[in-house]
Amino acid sequence: MSIVWILALSFAMVTLVTRAGCIINIDEFVMGLIIVAIGTSVPDCLSSILVARDGFGDMAVSNAIGSNVFDIDLGLGLPFLLTVLIQKGRPVSLLDESEIVLKEAGLFPIIPHVKFALVLLGLLLIISLFLILSKFRLNKFISISFVILYVLFIAYALVQQIVCRKYLC
């Protein structure tokens, strides 16, 4: 029964976020990147806080890394695999029809998914550098740095949404 509730609430969350994005004129991709990501990460955050408070910082970091690997590999892989199997091998497009037309015409310099993947890779490198410089000790500076990086990421996503609506970037 719990799985049914999770399914229903997940469907409701995605529907509400999509409609809210439509109302405030923010793309589904950016809404998923910000709002849905926050909603699905709160339980992970709370469990990391609890284990870190009990002195298991390595478990908190492992949880953060492990949940992202799970989300990417299984959370994306399994639904796409099922969709491809149901559609008899036809691939799933991450672009809508207008984006495909722009891409084929050469007017879409970089696909948003690739652009944000590169930004996330850059953030991962910066975070790794911070951890190396702090000798893998989580302190106040590292914590504040992580929060600032997240705020900058959100700002970047919103600026991209506003700017790229006018210019194809």
Image (cartoon, rainbow, N blue to C red):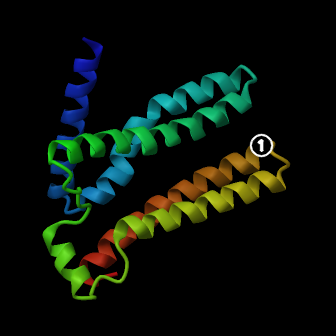
At which x and y percent is residue 135?
85, 48
Seen as rendered, the residue at the extreme right is: 135
Question: Residue at 14% across / 48% down in the picture?
Answer: 87
Q: Is residue 39 above or below residue 103?
A: above
Residue 70 vs residue 147: left or right? left
Front-most of residues 95 and 38: 95
Q: Is residue 113 above or below residue 42?
A: below
Seen as rendered, the residue at the extreme bottom is: 106
Quadrant containing the N terminus is top left
Q: Amino acid at mark 1?
A: Asn
Q: Secondary structure at mark 1?
A: loop
Question: Residue at 15% across / 49% down in the picture?
Answer: 19
Quadrant containing the C terminus is bottom left
Q: Quadrant of residue 94?
A: bottom left
Residue 165 vs residue 148: left or right? left
At which x and y percent is residue 104?
23, 83
Question: Residue at 56% across / 25% down in the picture?
Answer: 47
Question: Residue at 67% across / 55% down in the picture?
Answer: 127
Q: Residues within 10 Å of mark 1 (few under 14, many from 20)?
A: few
Q: Is residue 145 above or below residue 152?
A: above
Front-most of residues 73 and 53: 73
Quick check: can you spot residue 152? no
At which x and y percent is residue 67?
51, 36
Seen as rendered, the residue at the extreme front is: 88
The residue pinned by badge 1 equals 139
At which x and y percent is residue 45?
53, 33
Residue 92 vs residue 129: left or right? left
Quick check: can you spot residue 129? yes
